Image (tube, rainbow, N blue to C red):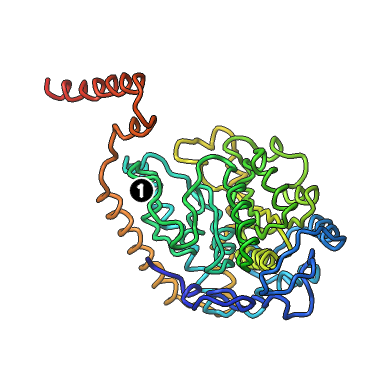
């Protein structure tokens, strides 16, 4: 797989800088503890389940934080004293790393576009596009360490890219030829989860195990704004808080839960829900890759230090349909999309790179050529995949077989045979 320059660095040990990026502060070395610290020492693997007044205060402080933005839609760096703690996590990011983040987003968008086109051509059964959410995914994905563990939904194609999963491996499930095309333990990236919200509980249980093992790695769970209405997510929040689990809940609020708007999902901003469970919540500009990177580094660092869970609400927008079976024109207005297009995450970073003289036309041209190569490879790999076994759906429903399943299989076989008869006429 093509790998970003931001990922070509060795795995770090506890308390050192995150793999593939610079500017991450080592846990416990700055002299200023992140909000919500319980006093656990960095890198020791020791955690406490005692809820202290500082933890409660941190939850309140985090819930009162305004939108964290470090890069404006015009591509200008933001100097905001209120967000200095988060900004410190990307204070010394290099031009090479910035170009790497840009490259990640461009190639991820190209892959996503190819997958959408392949579905329209009948090569995939379904596709869930990430268009518009590249900054939230690449920023948070690049904040993870090699030994962290990621629990995605079905739209985290950019995070998969950051974790080293070949993008073509994501497509087998959507073609119907497998239940996931990669080994989760090879990249610490779990298989895609279709059941809405359930991965939040999986991540919490895994994080509780990490704590019991005494490891200093973190866990991150991704879900959407619609999933926040699921009971599984609330249960995960409660377990994580009570057991001080080293888990970060990353909610990509793309404004629409299929056709249901935020107004029909919640009466308060989503990040404020963390306060009720006793841990900090932060709303970040999800179209700002620097802010997404910084806030996720902060949250994962405090989790690794034993300071418990955090909720990040990445405020972004789903530019396309919920999936390729959806028609957003039935419930959204074009002017809404146009307003968010002006906040495009890729254009935003490009403006900054150009204004700061961190990238020239040669860089963008080379990236465009690389994008074309990736698109071609994706098309070739998908078209070389086998057709799904139409009868596999009937297998392993019951351990010893079942008369009703046998009857349904026979009916389906007769239905399939009817097409062959029609073709022979």
Q: In terms of depth relative to the viewer, which is nearer, 144 or 106?
A: 144
Residue 59 position (above or below residue 27): above
The location of residue 409, given as percent across then percent down, is: 30, 24
Image coordinates for residue 136, horizontal then vertical, percent: 59, 58
Q: Which residue is mark 1?
A: 172
**Residue at 50% across, 42% down:** 194
Residue at the left extreme of this rendering: 424
Q: Quadrant of residue 334?
A: top right
Q: Is residue 418 left or right of residue 344?
A: left
* Residue 71 in view (yes/no): no
- Quadrant location, the C terminus: top left
The picture quadrant where one finds residue 231 is top right
Asked if one can make out residue 46 in the rendered structure from this viewpoint, the answer is yes
Q: Front-most of 111 and 181?
A: 181
Crowding at label 1, few (<14), some or many (≥20) Cα neighbours within 10 Å?
A: many
Q: How many marks?
A: 1
Q: Taking 56 as reference, is 99 above or below it? A: below
- Residue 145 vs residue 211, the one in the foreground: 211
* Spot occupied by residue 284 in the image (x, y as percentages of width and height): 69, 59
In the rendered image, which quarter contains the N terminus? Answer: bottom left
The residue under the point 42% across, 60% down is 165
Snapshot quadrant of residue 290: bottom right
> Is 354 on the left-hand or right-hand side of 301?
left
Percent across and percent down for residue 379 are: 30, 53
Q: Residue at x 53, y 52 (%)?
A: 152
| Residue in front for this viewpoint, 293 or 340 | 293
Q: Secondary structure at mark 1?
A: helix
């Amino acid at each position: 797989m093509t790998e970003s320059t931001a990922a070509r660095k060795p795995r770090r040990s506890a308390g050192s800088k995150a793999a593939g990026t610079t500017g991450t502060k080592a846990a416990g070395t700055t002299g200023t503890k992140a909000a919500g610290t319980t006093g656990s020492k960095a890198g020791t693997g020791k955690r406490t389940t005692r809820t202290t007044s500082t933890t409660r205060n941190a939850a309140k402080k985090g819930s009162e934080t305004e939108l964290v933005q470090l890069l404006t839609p015009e591509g200008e760096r933001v100097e905001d004293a209120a967000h200095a703690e988060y900004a410190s996590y990307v204070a010394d990011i290099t031009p090479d790393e910035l170009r790497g983040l840009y490259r990640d987003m461009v190639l991820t968008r190209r892959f996503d576009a190819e997958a959408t086109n392949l579905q329209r051509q009948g090569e995939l059964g379904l596709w869930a596009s990430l268009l518009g959410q590249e900054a939230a995914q690449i920023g948070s994905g690049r904040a993870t360490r090699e030994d962290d563990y990621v629990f995605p939904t079905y739209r985290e194609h950019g995070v998969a890219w950051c974790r080293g999963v070949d993008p073509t491996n994501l497509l087998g499930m959507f073609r119907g030829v497998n239940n996931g095309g990669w080994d989760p333990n090879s990249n610490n990236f779990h298989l895609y989860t279709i059941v809405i919200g359930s991965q939040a509980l999986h991540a919490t249980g895994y994080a509780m195990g990490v704590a019991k093992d005494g490891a200093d790695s973190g866990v991150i769970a991704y879900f959407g704004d619609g999933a926040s209405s699921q009971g599984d997510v609330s249960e995960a929040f409660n377990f994580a808080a009570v057991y001080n689990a080293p888990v970060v809940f990353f909610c990509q609020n793309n404004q629409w839960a299929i056709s249901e708007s935020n107004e029909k999902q919640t009466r308060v901003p989503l990040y404020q829900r963390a306060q009720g469970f006793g841990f900090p919540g932060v709303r970040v500009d999800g179209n700002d890759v620097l802010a997404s990177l910084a806030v996720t580094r902060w949250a994962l660092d405090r989790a690794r230090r034993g300071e418990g869970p955090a909720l990040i609400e990445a405020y972004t927008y789903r530019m396309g349909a919920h999936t390729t079976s959806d028609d957003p024109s039935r419930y959204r207005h074009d002017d809404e999309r146009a307003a968010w297009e002006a906040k495009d995450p890729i254009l935003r970073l490009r403006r900054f790179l150009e204004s700061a003289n961190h990238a020239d036309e040669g860089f963008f041209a080379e990236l465009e050529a690389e994008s074309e190569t990736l698109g071609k490879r994706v098309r070739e790999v998908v078209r070389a995949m086998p057709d799904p076994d139409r009868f596999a759906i009937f297998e392993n429903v019951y351990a010893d077989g079942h008369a009703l399943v046998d009857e349904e299989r026979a009916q389906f076989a007769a239905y399939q045979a009817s097409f062959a008869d029609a073709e022979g006429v």
